[in-house]
Amino acid sequence: MGIESELLVQGFAAFAGAFFAYFFTRVADFFGRVYQRQIKHFNSLVRLEQQLNEIGGIIDDNLYVIPPFRRVLESGNVYYNNLHIIKVDQTHFDDLHDVDLLNSLFVYQYEVRRNNDDISTFSNGLQMLTSALMNKGITHDEYKANVLLLAEQMKTMEAFHKRLQDNTTQLLSRVRVQIKMDVPLGTKLQRLFIHTAGDTGKITKKMVKDERKKLEKELKKSRAESRKEIEQIRKENNLS
């Protein structure tokens, strides 16, 4: 082989080496970005699950308070408890890349906002009436006539809360299924060396339905324990 041929081979080898080094660097960078995107999406799902659990607790607390709250107002007396606003943290939603889930969240947020508006209107009205009664700006009969209207409004609020509770459970069930399926690629590869992962694919209605049954059992147990604890506290403090 002549000197020219050797130089040509060496030049090509140098070029090929540089080319493939650059190529694999770009490929690694691409998959690194994809993996980071998957991680953000997965972490956002986990945060959403935690948030929906908290929201479910607030809704449950409100549903527990509404019946005695309404009875006190119907009797014309003053009730010193209140209903809690439901807060939805949207700061991590940009990291979600599932369009169907984002659409479901959009509808869900609208329902939450409507419930919050009802709670705010109710609470402000009751606060004004209570303040007016305490400051002798209105008579007790006038107070009772107005809070009876609020008590009637609470029936509608209770119905909307129950529907929101149902929708929260449904959405939470879907998110829990998706958390199991949307595990980042790097984590899936790691699991090959740790344990056998389940098959992944499209989220089906049956999967969400099965997860919901499981979730409802967990919620039923949690609520029963919470009720028992509350009743025990009331009993110990002679509040019942």
Image (cartoon, helix red, strand yellow):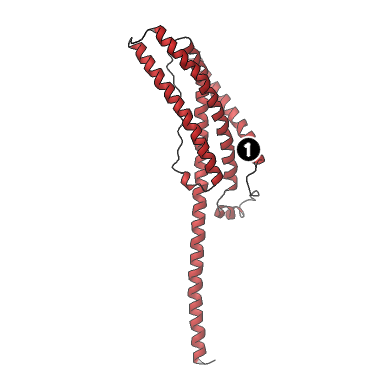
Q: Nearer the viewer, residue 106 or 49?
A: 106
Q: Position of residue 151 (x, y in %)?
A: 48, 16
Residue at horizontal 35 percent and vertical 15 percent from the top: 131
Visible residue check, residue 64: yes
Residue at the right extreme, as displayed? 206
Quarter of the image where one finds residue 85 = top left
Does any portion of residue 77 appear in the rendered image?
A: no
Label 1, residues with CA under 10 Å away: few <14, some 14-19, many ≥20 = some
Write the residue at 50% across / 58% down.
32
How far across and down, in percent of the image, does residue 79 sit? 44, 15
Compared to residue 232, the image places residue 12 above or below, namely below
Instruction: Please say if 85 is above or below 106.
Output: above
Q: Nearer the viewer, residue 79 or 111?
A: 111
The N terminus is located in which quarter? bottom right
The number of numbered badges drawn on the structure is 1
State the residue in front, 107 or 49: 107
Which amino acid, by three-letter code, is at mark 1?
A: Glu
Image position, residue 13 (x, y; %): 51, 80
Q: Secondary structure at mark 1?
A: helix
Residue linked to disc 1: 211
Question: In the drawing, does residue 133 fall left or right of residue 175?
Answer: left
Q: Seen from this angle, which residue lies furthest bottom?
A: 2
Name the residue nearer the viewer: 110 or 91. 110
Q: Is residue 233 above or below residue 54?
A: above
Q: x%, y% of residue 198?
A: 65, 48
